[in-house]
Amino acid sequence: MARALSNSSEEQEKPTHSNYQLDMSFLIRCQRLLGCLVGSPWYAWDSASRRQSVVWIYVLFLLIASGTEVLVYHVGLIPSHFYTILTAKDIGAFRAYMIPCLLIVLGVAGGKALVNFTGSLLSLKIRRLLTHHLHQRYIQSKTMYSLLLEHEQVDNPDQRITQDIDKLTETLFMIMEKLVMAPVLVVIYTWQCWSVAGFLGPFLIYTYFILGSIISRRLIQPIVRSVFYKELEEGNFRFLHVRLRQFAESIAFSQGETEEKERANSGLNSLLALQRSIINKQLPLHLMNQSFSYFGSILSYLIVAIPVFTGAFDGADAGELSGIISKHSFVSMYLIFQFTTIIEQSDKVSALAGYVARVGELLEAIDAVDQERQFKQVSLLVNHHDEPTILFDNVTLLSPRDKLIVTDLNLQVQQGTSIVITGPNGAGKSSLLRAMAGLWACARGQIKLPKLTHGRDLIFLPQVPYLTQGSLRDQLTYPSLDSTATLTDHEVRSLLEKVKLSHLERSIASFDTPYGLEWNKMLSPGEQQRLVFARLLFWQPTFAVLDEATSAMDEATELHLYQLVRASGITMISVSHHANLMPFHQQQLVLDGHGRYQVIDI
Ligand SMILES: Nc1ncnc2c1ncn2[C@@H]1O[C@H](COP(=O)(O)OP(=O)(O)OP(=O)(O)O)[C@@H](O)[C@H]1O
C-alpha cells in the first residue's frame, strides 16, 4: 500500500478521461451499483431478504414524498383562496378557511420532516449494503493482497470503501430529496399549465429547460473529472497522516519532522489546488443555475400574461382575476421550479458521478483480480495432495516485476523434517513463502501442500507480527472469532508462561478486555513476536512457516521458543539469518539471488 500511495496522483497512471464523465460508463456503473442494492427484481419479495431490501424503504419514501407534494400543491393555492376571500370581504369564509389552511401547512411540515427522515434511513441502508458488498468482494482470500501489493490499478481502495461510498450515498440522498417527485410533478404541472396557458406555456418552459440542460451538461463534465482526482488526493493526504501516526517514533528518532512537514504541506497543496479548480469550474455553473432560476420566475409571468392579454378571463371581476392570476402563476412557476430544481442538481450530479466512478472502478479492479486468479488457479497456484509433504515440483518463480527468484526448484518437505531457507537479502526467501501461501503464482511448475484436515494445519508467522484489535485471548486464538469458547483462562496463563510473557497479565485489566490498536504500543517488537508464537503453540499446526519470526528476540528467548515448537512436533519451514537456529532443522535451502539454489542436509 505504501508504494501505491507514496506516488503523487500525477505520477500514477491516470485512467482515460471517458471513465470520469457523465457518459455510458457512468450509467453502466450506476446500474451495477443498483444491482448490488436490489439484486434480482424478486429480491424485495423474498421474505428472507425483505428486511435487507432498500426497495421497501424507497416505496415508503415515495409514498410520503407524494403525499407531501399533494399538500404542497394545496399550500400553493392558499394565496389564491385568500385573495378571493379578502377581495370579497367574506369574514365567514375567512374563518372557515383558517382551520384547513393550518392543517395543510402542518401536514406539509410533517411530510417534509418525514421525507428527510426516511431519505436519511435509505441512504444509511444503501451505504450499509454497498459497503457490505465491497467488504465481501475486497476482504477475501488474496484479493486485498493483490490489489494493494501487486496490481495497484486503483488508488486508495480503503478510502473508496470508507469515504467515497459515504459521500456517494449522502449526495444521492440530497439529489433524491429534491428530485424524487420531479418526473410525476412535471407531468401534472405540464397538464395544469397547458390547461391554463395552452400549448405555448409548456412549450416555452420545455425549450427553456432543454437549453438549460445542454449548457449545464457542458459545464458539469470538467467538474466530474476534478471531483475524481480530488478524492484521490484526499486519500493520499489522509494516508500520509496515517503513516505519520504509524511511524511517529521512527520519525522522531531520525528527526525527520521538517521533511515530513514539507511532505504533508505539499500533499495538502495538491489537494487544495484540485479543490480550487473545482471551485473555479463551479462558478460558471452556479452563475448559470442562478440565472436560470431567476429568469424562470419572469417566464412564469409571461406565461400567465398570455391568457390575460388574449382576453381569456375578460368576464372575471378584479377579485376573481387576482385569484386566477395567483393560481395560474403558481402552476407555471411550479413547473419552472421543478425544472430549475433539476438543473440546480447538476452540481451534485457532477460530484455523484465522481464518487460512482471511484466506487465502480474499485469493483472493476476486484473483478480483474478475481478473473486473473481464476485463470491462474487452474495450474499455477498452490494445489493440495494426499501426501503429508510440501512439494515444490519444478517451480520457477518470478517477482511481480519479473525478477527471477528461483528456477526449476525441486524440493520435498516431509512432515517431521524441518527446513531453513537462507540466502542474501533480496534473494527471494520470503517470495518462496508467498508462493507457498498462494499469494504469488509460479511462472512454471507447481507447489503442492498436504490436504489440510483443519484450517490451521499450516500457519505463517511473518517477521512483522500482526496483532488483531481485540483482547489478549483474541490475540492467541486469531483468526478464530470466538476466543472465549476455545481457550480457558488457565490455558491463556500457560501459553503466556511458555512464551515468557506472564508479566503481561499484570498490565491488562483482564484477558477479555479489548485494547484496540494499543497492543503495538503496549508490547515491544520482541514481545509482539513472542505473543504470536503463543498463537502458534495454541493452534499446534502440522507445519509452521516462520519468516524471520524471531528477528527481534534476544538469543535465549529465540532458542527457547524454537525448542518449544520442535517439542510440539511442529515441522518448521524457517527463514533466518541466525546460525544458532540451524540445529533445529534437518535441511537447508540456499538461494543465491540469481535463480540458482542448493539443498543441503544438516
Ligand atoms: N510485491 C512485490 N512486487 C515486486 N517485487 C517484489 C515484491 N515483493 C518482493 N519483491 C522483490 O522480490 C525480491 C525478493 O524479495 P524477498 O522479500 O523474497 O527477499 P528476501 O530474500 O526475503 O530478503 P530479506 O532477506 O531482505 O528479507 C526482491 O528483489 C524484492 O524487491
Image (cartoon, rainbow, N blue to C red):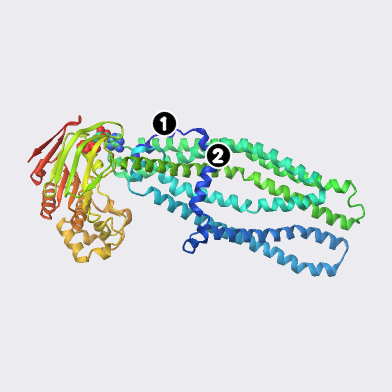
Query: In this view of the protein, which residue sits in the foreground, 433 or 166?
Result: 433
Q: Which residue corresponds to the image point at 18% horizontal and 45% vertical from the top-left?
A: 390
Number of residues whose C-alpha sits closer than 10 Å to that of mark 2, classed few (under 14), some (14–19) or many (20 or more): few
User: Which quarter of the frame holds ligand 1?
Assistant: top left
Placement of the N terminus among the 4 image quadrants = top left
Q: Give the mark nearer the N terminus: 1 vs 2.
A: 1
Residue 346 image position (x, y, % from top left): 61, 43
Query: Is residue 524 toward the left or the right of residue 44 in the image?
Result: left
- In the picture of the structure, the residue carrying the numbered disc 2 is 24
Give the secondary structure at mark 2: helix
Residue 3 image position (x, y, % from top left): 35, 37
- In the picture of the structure, the residue carrying the numbered disc 1 is 11
Q: Which residue corresponds to the image point at 87% horizontal and 48% vertical from the top-left?
A: 308
Q: Is mark 2 within 8 Å of ligand 1?
A: no
Query: Is residue 541 toward the left or the right of residue 237 in the image?
Result: left
Q: Is residue 526 visible?
A: yes
Q: Indicate which label's residue lies in the foreground, 1 or 2.
A: 2
Q: Is residue 509 visible?
A: no
Give the secondary structure at mark 1: loop
Residue 63 image position (x, y, % from top left): 63, 61
Residue type highlighted by circle 2: Met
Query: In this view of the protein, which residue sits in the foreground, 440 or 227?
Result: 440
